[in-house]
Image (cartoon, rainbow, N blue to C red):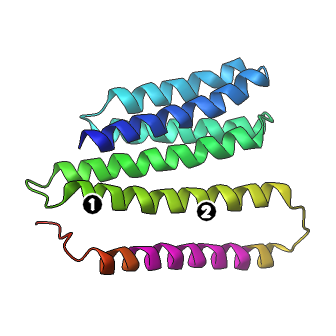
Amino acid sequence: MTEVRRSFFAALALGIGAPGLGMIVQGQWLLLLPLLAGGALWFGARKRRELMGWGSALCIGSLGLAVWFNVGMGWLLVGMAALLAAWDLDVFGAQLATVSRIENERRLIHAHWRRLAWVSVAGLLLGAMGLSLRVSLSFGLILVTALLAVLGLAQVVHSISKREKDAHTDVIPTP
């Protein structure tokens, strides 16, 4: 389980470091305060889940505030993807901690990392496309397009999960 914890800390560091660097480059030093406070709360409150939730919300909220102050969107996109990966790894690590014995734990962790990597890369690519393309659409069409994107991403995650489940039938979580 230490592998999951280390990857969580790496994702959290990237999620705070990338937007933090963008804030420094733009000269928005005050925006670092809620980001660093959220990261410290999330990192420091490992035993108290509700405080970790507040820490993650503060980190993501500070990214929203950074959009308002014109911090580079590339920094924020990488930060958001990393923070979402950190959140996923945090929840995954907590779920693993509740199970007394896991058969093929390493394989389970690696399968989770693969799925998370696919989703993160897809999110980064779609986000980069969204930032670079300029198209005028009505709100209704944007809503339908967003719904189709969410459904398509859910289908990709489901098919990857099913393929890995079929390939690794010997990875069976114990109740």
Q: Position of residue 87 (x, y in %)?
A: 42, 47
Disc number placed over residue 108 in the picture, else none: 1
Assess whether residue 104 is covered by the magenta stretch.
Answer: no
Q: Which residue is mark 2?
A: 122
In this view, 122 is above or below 34: below
On the rendered image, what quadrant is the N terminus found in? top left
Name which quarter of the figure residue 55 lies in: top left
Q: Position of residue 69 (x, y in %)?
A: 78, 33
Q: Position of residue 60 (x, y in %)?
A: 56, 42
Observer-nearest of 136 and 88: 88
State which tag comes first along the sequence, 1 or 2. Answer: 1
Badge 2 element: helix
- Identified at 77% across, 34% down, the residue is 71
Mark 2: amino acid = Ala
Assess whether residue 148 is covered by the magenta stretch.
Answer: yes
Disc number placed over residue 130 in the picture, else none: none
| Left or right, residue 16 beside residue 171 | right
| Left or right, residue 109 beside residue 40 | left
- Identified at 64% across, 27% down, the residue is 20
Q: Residues within 10 Å of mark 1 (few under 14, many from 20)?
A: some
- Identified at 70% across, 18% down, the residue is 29
Query: In this picture, which residue range is highlighted in magenta?
Result: 143-161
- Magenta region, main secondary structure: helix
- Identified at 78% across, 37% down, the residue is 72
Q: Position of residue 129 (x, y in %)?
A: 77, 60
